[in-house]
Image (cartoon, rainbow, N blue to C red):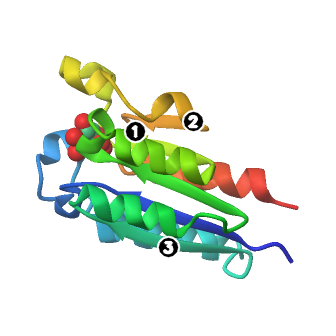
Amino acid sequence: MKIINITVLNGPNLNLLGLREPEIYGSTGLNEIEAKMNDLLIENNLEKKLTIDFFQSNREYELVDKIQDLMNKRNQWIIINPAAFTHTSVAIRDALLATKIPFIEVHLSNVHAREDFRKKSWFSDIAQGTITGLGANGYQFALEHIIENTQN
Ligand code: DQA
């Protein structure tokens, strides 16, 4: 049986979700988002077919290292909210390109409706898709997409 391995990566300050600017990022904490993603797998009886691993870091190199660790592993997907690194990090972009792992870019806020500097993403043109502005649900939608597209 082909097991799909999903890694959910979150960038800087997302450890503060729920506390940080809740009017922009909502009141749901990162732990809660992760628990709901696990629940989605259980509700769909997919615990044995899909694994899900969560990693948050405020440090760019740790995210690069984590992505490199996935290199040459089969049946991978990444869901990533690079947070502020979205707008700055050629290093994380290059790591994702190196692995060739398909990924979905998620943002809680609608980055296109905010400051101009947030409109530039180093990830959107190489992502399978992007979800922006749908709050914490964006992570669930990304997971649902993977579930629907990796069955059989
Ligand atoms: C964010 C948007 C980024 O511009 C910001 O730096 C973040 C979070 C979002 O999820 O809306 O930290 O990625």
Residues tagged 2 and 3 counted as in contact (Cβ below 8 A): no
Q: Which residue is mark 3?
A: 53
Identified by mark 2, the residue type is: Gly
Side of 35 where 114 appears, left or right = left
Give whichever of discs 1 and 3 has the lower sequence position: 3
Q: Nearer the viewer, mark 1 or mark 3?
A: 3
The Cα–Cα distance between marks 2 and 1, rounded to whole angstroms, is 14 Å
Q: Position of residue 107 (x, y in %)?
A: 36, 41
Is residue 91 placed above or below 50 in the rendered structure? above
The Cα–Cα distance between marks 2 and 3, rounded to whole angstroms, is 20 Å
Q: Which residue is mark 2?
A: 129
Q: Which residue is mark 1?
A: 134
Side of 37 where 99 appears, left or right = right
Give whichever of discs 2 and 1 has the lower sequence position: 2
Quadrant position of ligand 1: top left
Secondary structure beneath dot 3 equals strand
Identified by mark 3, the residue type is: Asp
